[in-house]
Image (cartoon, grey):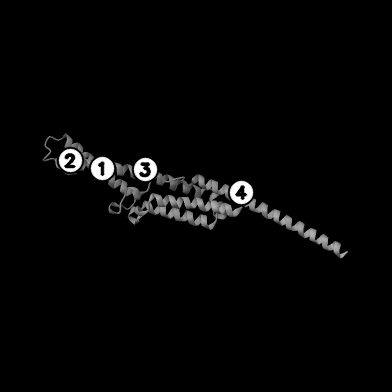
Amino acid sequence: MQEFLKKVTEKMMEKAFDTHAKLHYEYKKGNFESKKNIYEIFLSYFPQTLTTMPAEFISNIISWWTADTAKRSVCLKEKYYRESLEAYAESEDKENLFIAIRIGPDNIYKVKSEYQNLQYLNQKIEEYIEEYDEVITKLNEFKKSGTYNLFELYASQKVKDSLEEFEVAYHNAYYTSWGGYKISLIYINFLRDRVIASIKDDLKVSL
């Protein structure tokens, strides 16, 4: 009788263990699917790649308060050069011409070269501001979405930390006079890749 009860007890414990293991597996599977879906939604807002940063065209010698003030400064200087070159080209008395940028036969090519550099710089700043606005807008949209609370609940601390590091660096790069010109395109893409890598690591752990 005791042997019978022992076998029954062992079978019940084995069945309970199997049930627990199955429930644990189903929980982990459900947790994985939830995380995967949340991360997929997040990645639809997260930049796939970044193509420009102030460090690519602004040096520490000519840094401004923000990218916007850099654009205004460059646009104004470009305007002075353009109008001066146009006035110089149209004037018959080039020696006594009063213009914003002093131009003469001895420096005309230098002034033209500087004007072309300003045009290029202005174009690069516009490209950066456009990309920056798009990235920040999409990240803010994600934070206002219903998925953000689930992201905060399910995302690992490593994912959250890597995302915060990326956002801080990307934000600081906009403020060029705060040393943003030192944050290179290679580095910011490295931080972006680390966010994605931490997500992949989290999903592996969840399996």
Q: Amino acid at mark 4?
A: Glu
Alpha-carbon span between mark 1 and mark 4 = 54 Å
Instruction: Determine whether label 2 and label 3 are within 8 Å by CB.
Output: no
Q: Earlier in the sequence, mark 4 or mark 3?
A: 4
User: Please, what secondary structure does the residue beneath circle 3 have?
Assistant: helix
Q: Is residue 167 visible?
A: yes
Q: Residue at x 30, y 46 (%)?
A: 72
User: Please, what secondary structure does the residue beneath circle 2 have?
Assistant: helix
Alpha-carbon span between mark 1 and mark 3 = 17 Å
Badge 1 local density, few (<14 within 10 Å), some, or many (20+)? many
**Residue placed under numbered mark 4 in the picture:** 33
From the viewer's side, name the closer residue of 128 and 146.
128
**Residue placed under numbered mark 3 in the picture:** 127
Q: Amino acid at mark 2?
A: Ile
Coordinates of residue 52 in the picture (x, y in percent) = 38, 46
From the viewer's side, name the closer residue of 90 and 15.
15
Coordinates of residue 21 in the picture (x, y in percent) = 70, 56
- Quadrant of the frame with the N terminus: bottom right
Alpha-carbon span between mark 2 and mark 3 = 29 Å
**Residue placed under numbered mark 1 in the picture:** 78
Residue furthest to the bottom? 2
Say left or right for 82 vs 49.
Answer: left
Q: Earlier in the sequence, mark 1 or mark 2?
A: 1
Q: Residue at x 39, y 54 (%)?
A: 172
Q: Amino acid at mark 3?
A: Glu
Q: Nearer the viewer, mark 1 or mark 2?
A: 2
**Residue placed under numbered mark 2 in the picture:** 108
Badge 3 local density, few (<14 within 10 Å), some, or many (20+)? some
Q: Nearer the viewer, mark 2 or mark 3?
A: 2
Q: Amino acid at mark 1?
A: Glu
